[in-house]
Image (cartoon, rainbow, N blue to C red):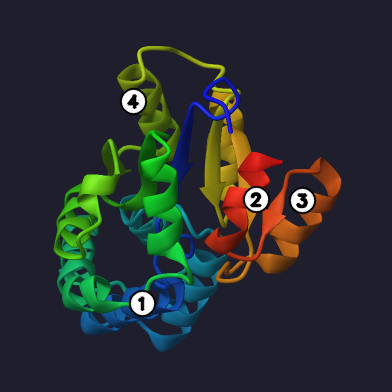
């Protein structure tokens, strides 16, 4: 592995570092139910959310509240109230959810080789930094970025921290959703699709076949890919 080929590795969090996609989908539903939304609208939102994993909670709830055909529209349920409920319901469970297979060993190995590591996630940034600190992971990363900034905005921050600008053609972004692919494309980073915990497997596998970006089952396949 050479510094010219792998200047840095950027990781999405949910489904890549943590086994948290199913957990988050459930918590989104719980937050809407807590505020009294109709079960049919909750189910429709859940399908939308799962199909758009990697999009921030802020944007997801904003889009949901913009639907004109909601069966029930509780007066107390604005975006900030929904975000607050979601964060409260998620917090303890997020800190305890499982890591993806081999995650810590892969991160330790890359860090030992002097490769700068970053996190760019749709999760709330402050929440993510707290959870990573609790899990003993924060020190492995040069920085950890999340929402409300977009993934594209946060990748530009990563570039700035590296003292450069796009294209980031020697920076690898490991993600499991189309939002990750689009963010990588926006800055010219190299995208790797982590398949096993993705909630959008058919779409992402089709895109991989069409575009030719590499696919790994989980992070255990990353070191060999970077060394190839």
* Upstream in sequence: badge 4 or badge 3: 4
Measure the alpha-carbon separation of dots 3 and 1.
28 Å
Q: On the rendered image, what quadrant is the N terminus found in? A: top right
* Upstream in sequence: badge 2 or badge 1: 1
Residue position for label 2: 224
Residue position for label 1: 98
Measure the alpha-carbon separation of dots 1 and 4.
28 Å
Residue nearer the viewer, 103 or 185: 103
Measured as percent of width and height from the top left, residue 7 is found at 49, 26
Measured as percent of width and height from the top left, residue 71 is found at 41, 78
On screen, 121 above or below 20? above
Circle 3 SS class: helix
Q: On the rendered image, what quadrant is the C terminus found in? A: top right
Label 2 environment density (alpha carbons within 10 Å; few <14, some 14–19, many ≥20)? few
Q: Residue at x 28, y 43 (%)?
A: 144
| Eye-nearest disc, 1 or 4 | 1
Residue position for label 4: 157
Circle 1 SS class: loop
Does 225 sit left or right of 6 as displayed?
Answer: right
């Amino acid at each position: 592995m050479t510094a010219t080929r792998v200047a840095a590795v950027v990781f999405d969090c949910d489904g890549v570092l943590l086994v948290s996609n199913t957990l988050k989908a459930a918590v989104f539903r719980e937050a809407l139910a807590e505020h009294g939304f109709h079960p049919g609208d909750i189910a429709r939102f859940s399908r939308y959310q799962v199909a758009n994993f990697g999009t921030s909670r802020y944007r997801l709830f904003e889009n949901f509240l913009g639907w004109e055909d909601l069966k029930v529209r509780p007066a107390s349920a604005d975006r900030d109230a929904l975000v607050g409920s979601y964060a409260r319901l998620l917090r303890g469970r997020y800190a305890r959810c499982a890591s993806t297979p081999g995650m810590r060993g892969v991160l330790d190995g890359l860090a030992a080789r002097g490769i700068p590591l970053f996190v760019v996630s749709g999760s709330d940034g402050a929440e993510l930094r707290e959870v990573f600190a609790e899990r003993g992971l924060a020190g492995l990363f040069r920085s950890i970025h999340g929402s409300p900034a977009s993934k594209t905005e946060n990748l530009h921050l990563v570039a700035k921290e590296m003292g450069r600008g796009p294209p980031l053609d020697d920076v690898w972004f490991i993600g499991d959703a189309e939002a990750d692919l689009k963010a990588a494309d926006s800055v010219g980073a190299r995208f790797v699709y982590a398949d096993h915990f993705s909630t959008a497997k058919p779409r992402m596998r089709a895109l991989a076949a069409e575009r030719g970006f590499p696919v790994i089952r989980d992070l255990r396949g990353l070191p060999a890919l970077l060394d190839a």
